[in-house]
Amino acid sequence: SQTIHQWPATLVQPVGSPLSLECTVEGTSNPNLYWYRQAAGRGLQLLFYSIGIDQISSEVPQNLSASRPQDRQFILSSKKLLLSDSGFYLCAWTWPTSGAHTDTQYFGPGTRLTVL
Amino acid sequence: QQQVKQSPQSLIVQKGGISIINCAYENTAFDYFPWYQQFPGKGPALLIAIRPDVSEKKEGRFTISFNKSAKQFSLHIMDSQPGDSATYFCAASMRSGGYQKVTFGTGTKLQVIP
């Protein structure tokens, strides 16, 4: 079976500090990977998606960047955090679209980031 | 055209009642419509999903009704229980450029009172 991990679970960082959130998926190969941000009481905003190693696409311009150094590892980073970066960050995976699998997105447990 | 409109924003239902959440979409290229359930502090989890060639799908107490011509779909929770209290998101998805492009509704916070 497939599992998705995120860490840390919670993070409190000062404004201007760097950020690194990690997501790993087990039990599948060549997944599509996604980073979402969820503001309090709001929906999910897609930040980045990746269809393969070093293949990253950004949905919205912002203070964040993403990298995929390994097939099942997805990292969200920032060089200098802003107050507006606070939120609940969710990683998700799907099967590659080339296959006959379901199109369901499977979400990780999330990271609660507070920037002070 | 990429929006998915979800209503109501919040819903209070008595235990044993029926909870109904509605969604509408614009883009007819969407071909997969999942519903997610999210508890506080947790990631969303797939609840039930439907493709547009089916008008209804039922799994236990959860039913999706789909109206392709009206571009609307809804989630019905029968015999609602306090444990169903959560935020529910509808979504519409299509394959685009090698990935699943998913558009989420804004969520409905459901509270089931005893």
Image (tube, rainbow, N blue to C red):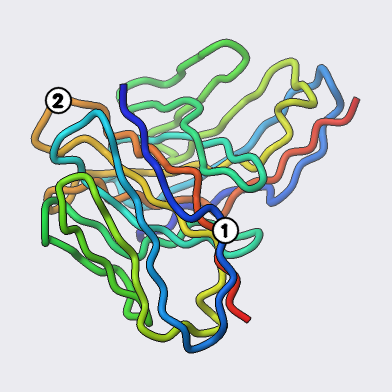
Q: Residues within 10 Å of mark 1 (few under 14, many from 20)?
A: few
Q: In this rendering, is residue A16 above or below B28?
A: below
Q: Circle 1 marks a residue in which chain? A: A
Between B29 and A103, the one nearer to me in the picture: A103
Please report the residue visible at 16 percent of the width from the left and 58 percent of the height from the top.
A69
Q: Foreground mark, 1 or 2?
A: 1
Q: Circle 2 marks a residue in which chain? A: A
Mark 1 or mark 2: whose residue is earlier in sequence: 1
Distance from disc 1 to disc 2, alpha carbons, whole Å, reads 36 Å
Quadrant containing the N terminus of chain B in the rendered view? bottom left
Question: Which element is circle 1 on?
Answer: strand
Please report the residue visible at 37 percent of the width from the left and 77 percent of the height from the top.
A78
Count of numbered badges drawn on the protein = 2
Please report the residue visible at 15 percent of the width from the left and 51 percent of the height from the top.
A70
x then y, percent, for residue A2: 31, 28
To which residue does mark 1 refer? A10
Numbered label attached to residue A100:
2
| A29 to the left or right of B45 | left
Q: In this rendering, is residue B8 above or below A41?
A: above
Q: Amino acid at mark 2?
A: Ala
x then y, percent, for residue A115: 58, 77
Numbered label attached to residue B54:
none
